[in-house]
Image (cartoon, rainbow, N blue to C red):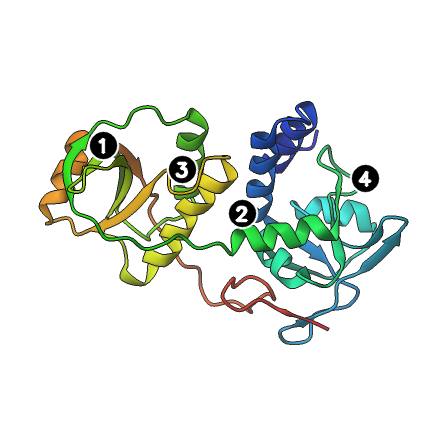
Amino acid sequence: MTKTTPLDTAHAAMIAAPDDDTVRLQFYERLADSELFLLLSQEAEGDQIQPEMFDVADGSFVLAFDRQDRLASFAERPAPYASMSGRVIAQLLMGQGVGLGLNLNIAPSSFLIPAEAVDWLHQTLGHAPDKVEAKISIFRRPTGLPESLITALDAKLATAGGLATSAYLVGVEYDNGSRGHLLGFVEALQNAEPALAKAVNEALTFSGIEAGALDVGFFAATDPVSAKLAKSGLRFDLPEPPVQPKAQPIIPGSDPAKPPILK
């Protein structure tokens, strides 16, 4: 029996509750974060790729699968592919008028995602949080946040191995009298701060939570604030970074910072 994947689970939840915007958003978040295998019409040439195109009544689509064996089962032949995240595929297809066929005819999560939805996903992922400066006067235990947000944060931070030591979710009151919640990162890599802030923003967006419901801060382990976070906060442990394998040929799409180019 084929192993059920996170995308299968997220897709099943969306189909079971077609009127629930939260589970629909959670499916698209899982799609964005998943590694997908994009079927190509020919082997990649450097950083240039040519996806296999399929035309149906609903438009043109490229095909991607969340397991290599699923791609192989669909193709029924040795087939070239490029490995990349769903967010990179959305970036490539943005404005092209091309949709995404996911696991077509080969898995429970078989799904045609129209071009408009692919464009929406890319635009949603491109939203960046606003920067604000305020002094925290009181730290409290976090209360009143939906469980869906806690789950989304846990899933997001599980993919951020090595970017920070830990993170704490706390209730806060600022010196201007306003109250809210803060996710404080401890010992974050300086160049990782924008990516971590964006990841938290995505967790909010795809949980259906109002923007601005959660602030983000970055603190050194020696900062007195870190001790207050540990005392009052809900802790999230970021996994250790994976051991880097020996250098291997780069597969187009494997580096999110250098997406491949469509031919």
Where does residue 257 sit, x and y in percent of width and height?
Answer: 49, 66
Where does residue 152 sit, x and y in percent of width and height?
Answer: 45, 35
Question: Is the Cβ of the residue at disc 1 closer than 8 Å to that at disc 3?
Answer: no
Q: For this rendering, which residue is in front, 210 or 243?
A: 210
Where does residue 72 sit, x and y in percent of width and height?
Answer: 76, 49
Residue topped by disc 2:
33
Under mark 4, the amino acid is Asn
Q: Between marks 4 and 1, how big is the CA–CA gap? A: 45 Å
Above or below residue 56? Residue 10 is above
Q: Which mark is residue 105?
A: 4
Q: Between marks 4 and 3, how big is the CA–CA gap? A: 32 Å
Under mark 3, the amino acid is Leu
Residue topped by disc 3:
153
Sequence-earlier tag: 2 or 3: 2
Residue topped by disc 1:
233
Sequence-earlier tag: 4 or 1: 4
Under mark 1, the amino acid is Gly
Q: Between marks 1 and 3, how big is the CA–CA gap? A: 14 Å
Mark 2 vs mark 3: give the one in front.
Answer: 3
Q: What residue is drawn where x is 42% and y is 46%? A: 201
Residue 6 visible in the displayed image = yes
In terms of secondary structure, where does tag 3 sit? helix
